[in-house]
Image (tube, rainbow, N blue to C red):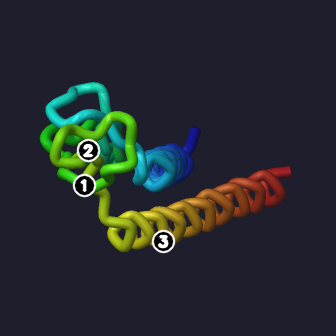
Amino acid sequence: MPPVSAISQSGLAAATLRLNVSASNLANIDDTSPVGSAQGYQPGTVVQSALPGGGVAAQAVTLSSAQLLAYDPTAAIANDQGLVQAPDIDPISEITNQLAASRAFAFNLDALKAAEEDQQSLLDIST
């Protein structure tokens, strides 16, 4: 596989992972658990690192201590003060992450298409 294609494909995979993690965070923004519980939704993020020779490696990681207290006295799991534990997720940041990841996906897809067109041009010339 040409290096440009491998680099683009790693970027596509990283952008897809970023979109999936962010979508999961937004889907679970209203998840609650009892105060002090470790069972609630733990938001995630994606850590990316450059690969030797080009491209990127991406790994989803769970954010520890990303919880806050919310007042919901009607919840069955609320404590005596009416508090529940909720994930600390900023919807604006998540939407911004999704926009950036979708643009990264589009740019990597364009690069992959350009690499394939170049490869096809070389094949047409050599025949």
Three-letter amino acid code at disc 3? Answer: Leu
Q: What residue is shown with label 3?
A: 99
* SS at mark 1 in the image: strand
Question: Who's the residue at 39% across and 64% down the image?
Answer: 94
Q: What residue is shown with label 2?
A: 84
Q: Is residue 10 left or right of residue 64?
A: right
34 shown above or below 101: above
* SS at mark 3 in the image: helix
Question: Who's the residue at 34% across and 37% down the image?
Answer: 41
Q: Which mark is residue 70?
A: 1
Question: Who's the residue at 22% across and 27% down the image?
Answer: 38
110 shown above or below 124: below
Q: Position of residue 28 (x, y in %)?
A: 44, 47
41 shown above or below 100: above
| Mark 2 surroundings within 10 Å by alpha-carbon count, few (fewer than 14), some (14 through 19), many (20 or more) | many
Image quarter of residue 120? bottom right
Q: CA gap, disc 2 to disc 3?
A: 31 Å
Q: Nearer the viewer, residue 15 or 54?
A: 15
Q: Nearer the viewer, residue 116 or 29?
A: 29
Answer whether residue 62 is visible to the viewer in this image: yes
Earlier residue among tags 2 and 3: 2
